[in-house]
Amino acid sequence: MKRALPALRRPTAMLAGGLLALGIISVVSAQDGAEDLADIISAVDTAWLLIAGFLVFFMQAGFAMLTAGFVRSKETANILMKNMIDACVGGVSFWLVGWAFAYGVSDASNEFIGLGNFGLNQLAEAGYGHADWFFQFAFAAAAATIVAGALAGRTKYSAYLIYTVVVTGFIYPVVVHWGWDGTTWMGAFTDDIWLGNGYVDFAGSGIVHTVGGMAGLMGAIAVGARLGKYGPNGEVRAIPGHNISIATIGMFILWFGWYGFNPGSTLGLSGGGAALAASVAVTTTLAAGAGGITAMLWSRFRTGRYDTGLTINGILAGLVAITAGTATVDPWAAVVIGGIGALVMYYGVQMLDGVFRIDDPVGAVSVHAFAGIWGVIAVGLFSSQAGMEAAGYSNPQHYGLFLGGGGEQLLMQLIGIAAIVGWTAVTAGILFFAIKFTVGLRVSEEEEMRGLDLMEHGVDAYPDFGPSGSGIFGSSEIGGGGR
């Protein structure tokens, strides 16, 4: 034992010396400690916002795979091109005008739209940073991408280029200004909140998903159904997607990206943001799980089969539904909201197909618009007082009706979502019908029959088996062409 003592003296002395050095450094630099700590906190918050933005942007890959899997093989390259251009055009248009309309300078005389910071010319002066713009751009691109699925299989690519600019540059940013800016008529962050906590939509069930879904609905109405979707006697004909495998992978990518979408909407980790983000991750997960389970069991009950496509959309509907109240509801409520969201999606599909004969190839309207509307309403029903307070809303005494918080917040949610639905339906309706009667919205019957990949882009997504049927060896070498 005595022999061991000398061996311990050197590391002990080194440790003591290191601690002494740290003590001396801390005393010498105490005057700069507050500034350094503030810089570290700011850096951590900025890094969190950027990482969350990266996750939301990665959802573009999820949308691409999900939608490609749900459409026919001859439309695969077309839908992938649309997803790519969403990111490209969305970035430029949101930089040029979208951010200005969403978060630009406005005053009490103008609570409708932001007007300032075009091209980010005054970003720092307005109190924002580049991380704020990037995070919001990722949301704008997601809203535009939702539209593509509802119009898949029969829409001109040139028409898509027009409406994606308008959605990301004008229609969506105005709603963002209403709901999330600090100088607006209905938001929760204004000085003059006139009902409850104002419109509460933590991560965008209404602001992002309902806007995208409603724009998709108006586009689907304007462009009409795919050839052969509805029979002469009104029967609904299934047109199955070509690859459920990549659709499933797309769903999981979207689910993963939702952890940037919802927890990232804390906008930082300091000041309680980390604990709130963790809580949001829990409610997000539970709602997705409940949505998937509900859709699976309900499809079995209604059809006798465990439907894979409906289960995929049930998970997504649960995610969409919880996005508005993810920070203000308890875990048990997240399960209820996600489960009901899946049922809303299911009957939304039935209504569009069976009653209104509106063709939505991927279920985008039911998942995003209908489940999004439900999610906004659910805030006024299930939000807890503790949840409202933890999320930083000004009047936490106004919370969910079912938990004893009165009906004021529910009324505000109904007003807010009605405004969003009305604005999007009118503006997107004007947009799509204007395109239809000018440059044209729909491809010809021949183009639709042969496939948009070949006719719009000159390529087969699957050259060995696609419409050209040439294969990798060429038709002359294999004794004839394919389909």
Image (cartoon, rainbow, N blue to C red):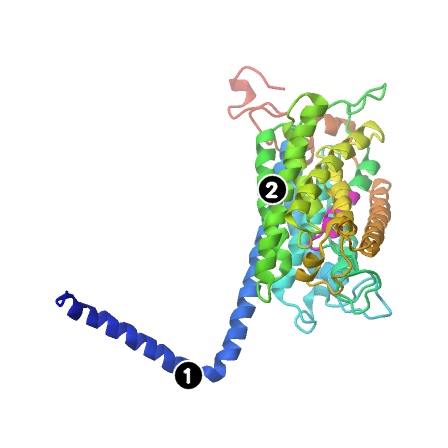
Q: What element carries label 2?
A: helix
Q: Does residue 407 show up magenta in the picture?
A: no
Q: Does residue 128 appear in the picture of this structure?
A: yes
Q: In this view, does 278 lie above or below 111?
A: above
Q: What element carries label 1?
A: helix
Residue shown at 76%/22% (left/top)? 237
Magenta portion: prevailing SS class: helix
Q: Where is residue 17 in the image (x, y as percent from the top left)?
A: 29, 77
Residue 457 seen in render:
no
Q: In which quarter of the image is residue 468?
A: top right
Q: Tell me the quarter of the image containing the C terminus.
A: top right
Report the span colored magenta: 202-214
Which residue in the structure is indicated by mark 2? Answer: 62
In the picture, the disc for residue 197 is: none
Rendered view: 28 above or below 130: below
- Label located before the other in sequence (1 or 2): 1
Q: Residues within 10 Å of mark 1 (few under 14, many from 20)?
A: few
Q: In this view, does 230 lie above or below 285?
A: above
> Can residue 206 be found in the magenta stretch?
yes
**Residue drawn at (78%, 35%) of the image:** 348
- The residue wearing badge 1 is 27
The x, y position of residue 107, in whole percent, is: 82, 70
Among all residues in the image, which is located at the extreme top?
479
Residue type at tag 1: Val
| Residue 291, horizontal then vertical, whole percent | 66, 38
